[in-house]
């Protein structure tokens, strides 16, 4: 029928090339991995914070850990098992994160490699977990009442179980009951105790303060103590109607179960405990730290605080205490979740308390119940900066699904003065790097601009200027997000060969553009939908389609109202007219100049929703496909409509795919003399349309005439999903495919099986033969929900029903795309409704690899999720699920865009090293050695206890040695101090030096020197060996001299021994010299590190400190 388009047959050489069927893609090319992840997972359940590195970790119910830093630095960690986390804590400033899974596996994560450094499976259920602040020591409490000590060795990358433990039998004997089957609810190391004292809270209400250095019980608290002085306090100020007299307190509370515990003072003198029945108790431990051997009266005061007078109350699940500086460690604010009446509205309670006149006079000075926007998950307190004076002043609240809110403590305090019991406090939501729900994302596009494109340099300059303007805007608004951790990736200009931009459209009509060149996306533009002086329905219409032209830097935006807006990223001084195009003509309007992308034209020619947009002819043309099947071709340069297909000539089914092929003759891999009438064909080509009911339409772009309209009949009736035109692929002969391709059953691959003849409707044949050029050199891949079908485009246009390959899919497909490896090598990606992803080779359609969203991202497939999926030809896919955004890479080849140096690091090694050094020096030493001022301020506040009153003071090197000595032995088996002192006395002799390990010299105290010198006698006495003090020397006999100094053996043996001694001495002197050189090299390394740190801090702005 269309044989006139293909008048001349290809040459013999061309036919030989056509018969070659191969694909360079193989299963080895399939390597799925997660490159980037943004957003808070909806099933987030637990929080952890590193106050030095300024990182926040969020654990989920499906085994993921999300780490947030500053400058859009986010990382995600995947546990091998899809299990939730019971505990999550940073090994602060060390680059490691410790977690406990629900199946009682302790995992330590390396933040640099983003992998598990070490894991330890615990035999019994872990019920308590606590990291000693500033160390790598961990307390672990079990369901059998035992408390163990672990240590993570960062060099060996191993979790060690240390010999020390808290003996349960000793505590059981002191308590008077067996604790073998009583769970440990909480283990807290006591502040100001150097980590050697810990408070153990048991499930049955017993609390024990244990001294690990002395292996003794300091005190025991519990309701069986009849000497306790109890007092009840109202939770609202000036409200005594619910307050019971002290002598009427319930004495049947001996079996109260502990639910949560927190220190209520920075010195460990007061502890607050939440119980399952909703009660909150303040226990006075002020005299518990008295030295052993001194008889002091231990306080027996306990204060009860009830948030509700109801009989049935919620358990007190979470307790956090924030001390008030003005009350001098005798008051503050208590943050509580729970304790309210069962069935009441879910709130977060903040209570201000004061006991400046004594704990027995504790009173409530304020209360506020903050209503939550979602289901509560966890909360954590922090300070706005690690060197800020004063107590913690911010609160993170995690609620479901995946909402992270930041509350200011001062703002909550001011709301207490309004005397409102319940209120909705203003909160700052987590600033999503890529918003997906608020506002709701409707479509997305990934644009790529290569270095050889003329607009490359202009776009690079635009993005740099836009990012600087975005940072200045945030600064002027006073936004100061407390998470500033992480180190941005290195920006290497020699690898800067491409620019990637990620574009997203939203339901409110807005468009956002990110610079995605480096693996830390940064927002550069936020385009609002309003267009001044034009009354068209786009202000509230959702964005339905996007396309970006890398040649002209134009952005086309389609709306559900049918309007198409054209934006230019490059602004011209002469470009001051806005073209408004309708069916009636074009109107030119003056537009106001402003920053950012500017709208150059608005096309309103249809009321049907815009389904797809595609630039053609190097950005000179724009093809618009509408949802009801109409197609419009717009001329960008003249702002006019070239054609709009008539409704009656289009199928009634909705459009699902559009592909425009406006190729020059010289761009086709075929000899021009093989086709006639090639003159005046530049920029012309067909527009292919696929509808949901499998109707294929080919339109001539010259006049908008329908060249071909036929219904493709898949073997199994199913909806069409997409259509792909594969360029540069020679015609594949059916004979060659038949000989090379194995036959499979119906569920596999089929080749060369003709289907029934499909009905073909054609118009008058075209005079020009450019369609023949494109058809002769291309394949068409039709993707249905249950079938993949590969055809020769020439055969399809001629009306033939033969296909090259056909695959019957077992699952229903919902989205497809193609990847390009070489110039003419393609692969197909298939996404199923179940969330499974397949990589298939072309043209054979064989499966090269498969993965599921559940296994790689822990995602479940959602409806309409395919509308926001976008991809690039190099193997990257960007997906959106709820408020999460992920970038996947499916191919093994080296990423030409994001090399490893580009990726940001979650742990700042320079900051960690600087903090470690400066905390060991005095402020005067820091100033003399030129330490940066930020670290000097940190050390001053840190040592003064002003950095964060809720945090435990750092354990320095001398205390670390003490903990090492304590935990290296089982309880009651530590070596005595006298033995250690005897080992400290030594005389330094070069012949006795052993240089196997780095030399550490400890300077003895004066009292130790006096003890060692006492009784040793003078040098004269040692020389005369016990001789009298008489100055007259005593003559010795020859026998005495021989017995003292004569060596056994002959003279040669003595000479050999002396020679060996000299050689040994020389070796030791050389080792000492080598050690000295190493120390000097270490000093130089430290100096260079300090210089690098100073340079880095100079580049940081004040809000990034």
Image: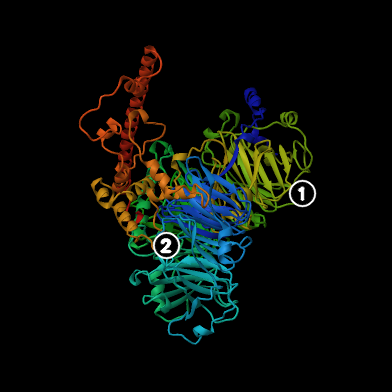
Closer to the chain start, of discs 2 and 1, is 2
The percent coordinates of residue 850 (x first, y second) are 65, 43
Q: How crowded is mark 1: few (under 14 residues within 10 Å), some or many (20 or more)?
A: few
The percent coordinates of residue 958 (x first, y second) are 38, 49
Q: Is residue 375 visible?
A: no
Q: In which quarter of the image is the N terminus?
A: top right
The residue where tag 1 is placed is 716
Residue plotted at (75% across, 45% down):
758
Height in image: 184 above or below 243?
A: above
* Label pair 2/1, CB-CB below 8 angstroms: no
Residue 311 occupies which quadrant of the picture? bottom right
Q: Is residue 188 visible?
A: yes
Height in image: 164 above or below 322?
A: above
The residue where tag 2 is placed is 293
SS class, disc 2: loop
Asked whether 703 or 1100 is in front, the reply is: 1100
Q: Quadrant of the C terminus?
A: bottom left
What number of labels is visible? 2
Height in image: 830 above or below 673?
A: below
- Furthest residue toward left: 1031
């Amino acid at each position: 029928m269309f044989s006139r388009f293909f008048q001349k047959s290809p040459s013999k050489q061309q036919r030989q090339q056509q018969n070659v069927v191969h694909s360079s893609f193989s299963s080895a090319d399939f390597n799925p991995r997660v490159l980037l992840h943004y957003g808070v997972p909806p099933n987030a359940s637990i929080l952890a914070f590193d106050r030095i590195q300024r990182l926040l970790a969020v654990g989920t119910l499906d085994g993921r850990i999300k780490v947030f830093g500053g400058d859009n630095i986010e990382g995600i960690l995947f546990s091998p098992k899809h299990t939730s986390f019971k505990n999550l804590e940073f090994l602060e400033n060390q680059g490691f994160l410790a977690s406990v899974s629900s199946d009682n596996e302790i995992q330590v994560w390396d933040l640099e490699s983003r992998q598990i450094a070490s894991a330890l499976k615990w035999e019994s259920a872990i019920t308590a977990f606590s990291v000693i602040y500033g160390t790598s020591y961990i307390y672990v409490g079990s369901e059998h009442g035992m408390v163990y000590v672990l240590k993570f060795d960062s060099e060996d990358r191993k979790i060690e179980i240390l010999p020390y433990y808290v003996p349960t039998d000793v505590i059981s004997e002191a308590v008077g009951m067996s604790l073998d089957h009583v769970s440990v609810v909480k283990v807290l190391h006591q502040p100001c105790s150097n980590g050697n004292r810990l408070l153990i809270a048991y499930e049955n209400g017993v609390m024990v303060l244990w001294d690990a250095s002395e292996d003794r019980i300091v005190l025991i608290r519990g309701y069986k103590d009849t000497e306790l002085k109890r007092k009840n306090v109202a939770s609202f100020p000036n409200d005594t109607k619910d307050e019971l007299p002290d002598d009427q307190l319930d004495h049947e509370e001996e079996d109260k179960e502990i639910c949560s515990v927190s220190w209520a003072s920075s010195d460990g003198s007061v502890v607050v405990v939440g119980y399952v029945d909703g009660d909150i108790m303040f226990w006075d431990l002020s005299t518990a730290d008295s030295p052993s051997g001194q008889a002091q009266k231990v306080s027996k005061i306990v204060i009860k605080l009830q948030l509700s007078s109801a009989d049935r109350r919620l358990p007190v699940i979470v307790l956090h205490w924030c001390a008030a500086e003005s009350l001098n460690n005798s008051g503050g604010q208590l943050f509580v979740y729970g304790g309210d009446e069962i069935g009441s509205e879910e709130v977060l309670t903040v209570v201000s308390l004061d006991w400046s006149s004594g704990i027995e006079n504790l009173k409530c000075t304020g209360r506020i119940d903050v209503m939550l926007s979602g289901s509560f998950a966890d909360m954590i307190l922090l300070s706005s900066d690690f060197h800020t004076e004063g107590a913690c002043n911010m609160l993170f609240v995690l609620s479901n699904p995946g909402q992270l809110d930041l509350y200011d403590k001062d703002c909550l305090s001011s709301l207490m003065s309004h005397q409102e019991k319940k209120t909705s406090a203003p909160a700052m939501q987590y600033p999503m790097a890529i918003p997906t729900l608020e506002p709701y994302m409707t479509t997305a596009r990934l644009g790529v601009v290569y270095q050889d494109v003329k607009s490359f340099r202009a776009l690079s300059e635009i993005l740099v200027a836009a990012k600087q303007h975005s940072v200045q805007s945030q600064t002027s608004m006073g936004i100061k997000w407390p998470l500033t951790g992480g180190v941005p990736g290195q920006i290497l200009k020699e690898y800067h060969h491409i620019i990637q931009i990620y574009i997203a459209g939203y339901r409110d009509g807005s468009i956002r553009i990110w610079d995605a060149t480096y693996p830390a996306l940064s927002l550069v533009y936020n385009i609002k939908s309003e267009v001044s002086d034009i009354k068209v329905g786009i202000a509230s219409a959702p964005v339905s389609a996007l396309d970006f032209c890398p040649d002209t830097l134009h952005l086309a935006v389609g709306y559900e109202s049918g309007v198409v807006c054209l934006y230019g990223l490059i602004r011209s001084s002469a470009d001051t007219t806005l073209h408004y195009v309708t069916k009636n003509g074009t109107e030119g309007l003056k537009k106001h100049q402003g920053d950012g992308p500017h709208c150059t034209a608005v096309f309103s020619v249809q009321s049907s929703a815009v389904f797809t947009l595609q630039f053609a002819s190097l950005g000179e043309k724009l093809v618009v496909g509408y949802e009801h099947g109409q197609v419009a071709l717009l001329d960008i340069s003249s702002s006019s409509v070239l054609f709009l297909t008539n409704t009656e000539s289009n199928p009634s089914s909705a459009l699902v795919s559009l592909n425009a092929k406006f190729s020059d003759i010289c761009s086709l891999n075929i000899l021009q003399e093989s086709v006639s009438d090639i003159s005046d064909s530049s920029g012309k080509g067909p527009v292919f349309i696929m509808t949901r009911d499998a109707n294929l339409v080919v339109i001539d772009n010259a006049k908008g005439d329908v060249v071909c309209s036929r219904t493709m009949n898949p073997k199994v009736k199913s909806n069409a999903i997409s259509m792909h035109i594969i360029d540069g692929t020679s015609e594949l002969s059916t004979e060659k495919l038949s000989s090379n391709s194995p036959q499979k059953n119906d569920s596999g691959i089929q080749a060369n099986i003709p289907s029934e003849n499909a009905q073909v409707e054609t118009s008058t044949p075209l005079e020009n033969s450019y369609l023949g050029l494109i058809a002769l050199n291309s394949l068409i891949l039709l993707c249905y929900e249950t079938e993949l079908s590969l055809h020769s485009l020439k055969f399809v246009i001629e009306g033939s029903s033969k296909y090259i390959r056909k695959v019957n899919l077992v699952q229903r497909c919902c989205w497809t795309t193609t990847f390009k490896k070489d110039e003419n090598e393609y692969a197909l990606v298939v996404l199923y409704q179940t969330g499974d992803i397949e990589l298939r080779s072309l043209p054979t359609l064989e499966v090269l690899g498969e993965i599921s969203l559940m296994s790689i991202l822990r995602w479940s497939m959602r409806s309409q999720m395919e509308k926001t999926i976008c991809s690039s030809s190099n193997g990257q896919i960007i997906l959106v699920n709820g408020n999460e955004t992920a970038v996947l890479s499916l191919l093994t080849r080296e990423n030409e865009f994001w090399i490893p140096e580009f990726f940001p690091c979650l742990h700042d090694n320079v900051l960690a090293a600087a903090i470690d050094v400066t905390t060991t020096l005095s402020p005067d030493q820091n100033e003399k050695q030129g330490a940066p001022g930020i670290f000097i301020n940190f050390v001053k506040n840190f040592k003064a206890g002003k950095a964060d009153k809720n945090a435990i003071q750092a354990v320095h090197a001398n205390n670390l040695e003490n903990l090492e000595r304590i935990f290296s032995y089982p309880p009651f088996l530590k070596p005595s101090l006298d033995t250690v002192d005897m080992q400290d006395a030594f005389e330094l002799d070069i012949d006795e030096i052993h240089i196997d390990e780095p030399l550490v010299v400890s300077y003895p105290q004066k009292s130790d020197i006096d003890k060692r010198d006492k009784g040793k006698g003078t040098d004269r006495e040692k020389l005369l060996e016990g001789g009298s003090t008489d100055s007259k020397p005593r003559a010795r006999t020859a026998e005495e001299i021989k017995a003292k100094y004569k060596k056994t053996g002959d003279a040669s043996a003595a000479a050999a021994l002396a020679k060996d001694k000299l050689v040994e001495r020389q070796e030791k002197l050389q080792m000492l010299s080598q050690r000295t050189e190493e120390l000097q090299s270490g000093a130089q390394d430290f100096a260079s590190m300090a210089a690098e740190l100073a340079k880095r801090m100079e580049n940081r702005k004040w809000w990034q400190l």
